[in-house]
Image (tube, grey):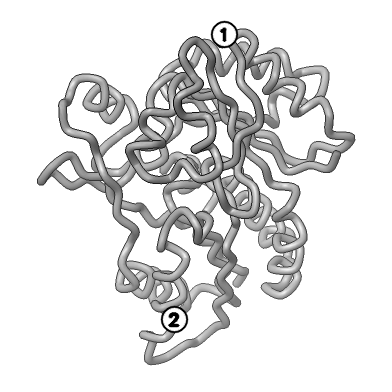
Amino acid sequence: MAVKIITDSTSDIPPEMAKNMGITVIPLTVSFGNEHFLDNVTLKPDEFYRRLSLSGIYPHTTQPSPAVFKENYEKLMPQADGILVINISSKLSGTYQSALSAVTMLENISCPIEIIDSQTVSLALGLLAIKANDLAKSGKTLGEIKEAITQSLPDAQPVMFFDTLTYLHKGGRIGRAQSMIGSLLSVKPLLTVRDGVVTPLTRVRSLQAGMDQLYNFAAQHSTLEYVGIGYATSTTDALKLKERLAPLFPPEKIYLTQVGPVVGTYTGPNTLCINIIGKS
């Protein structure tokens, strides 16, 4: 048996990829009015962005209940030496708290369970889960994996190009980027997550300039361990960025995933994001 890895759907690891890797992804819920969907399970990204563009209803999101985590713990424990759970920043969602609460609900704990607040979101979170899974497959113990991932938290960073801050503002997750509201008439913001909170980096006037910034962010790192690109609606832009990153990191090792409905609720369409685990 080996250590099993659990993350949540804000990691933007697609279901098929998660299945192939053996990572358990617990979905959050996205709702349009009284219609409720499991993130990237009963509502896929393309349909979500279509609804987001056409519907007059602004979606809202809900964290998984402790009972959902408990059910997954009970399913995995018989086949695991340990379980490591890596969740979205606790400053952006209550998912981490649900994961913690679920442990106290278990009657019989047959293997140790450790839970990490990633202090990040989207594919930066996903890369942490992928790294943990790689370590588990290499035979590392739960303690060794937890230590390695904890040490990697400061190195796991997303940088996101936003076409607009409207969705982030409406969703109440704007954090330190609040200072940009009102000054973004013809410019596009680039944001990151620091200390678990959405934080502004800079602003640009075009997508091309934004892609330059995403590339420069990766290029400033002396070591790149994992790289991923997240996109909302434009595969073309994501592939262009992947090709451009080729001198820095092997393209075949760059993960390319679509930003899911829950994260997309706050980013909106036309978002492009680079995610890394690396050192400057």
Residue 225 picture quarter: top right
On screen, residue 84 versus residue 143, left or right, reads: left
Residue lying farthest to the left in this orientation: 34
Q: Tell me how many marks there are.
A: 2
Residue 124 picture quarter: top right
On screen, residue 72 versus residue 135, left or right, reads: left
Q: Residue at x 72, y 13 (%)?
A: 244
Instruction: Classify the position of the C terminus by image quarter.
Output: top right
For mark 1, give the secondary structure. loop
For mark 2, give the secondary structure. helix
- Residue identified by numbered label 1: 206
Q: Look at label 1 and name its amino acid.
A: Ser
Residue 248 vs residue 134, the one in the foreground: 248
Which label number is shown at residue 103?
A: 2
Which label number is shown at residue 112?
A: none
Check the image and report above or below for 183 versus 173: above
Instruction: Classify the position of the N terminus by image quarter.
Output: bottom right
Crowd band around label 2 with a 10 angstrom C-alpha radius: few (<14), some (14–19), many (20+): many
Q: Position of residue 181 (x, y in %)?
A: 46, 29
Q: Look at label 2 and name its amino acid.
A: Val
Q: Position of residue 47 (x, y in %)?
A: 26, 27
Q: CA distance from mark 2 to mark 1?
A: 47 Å
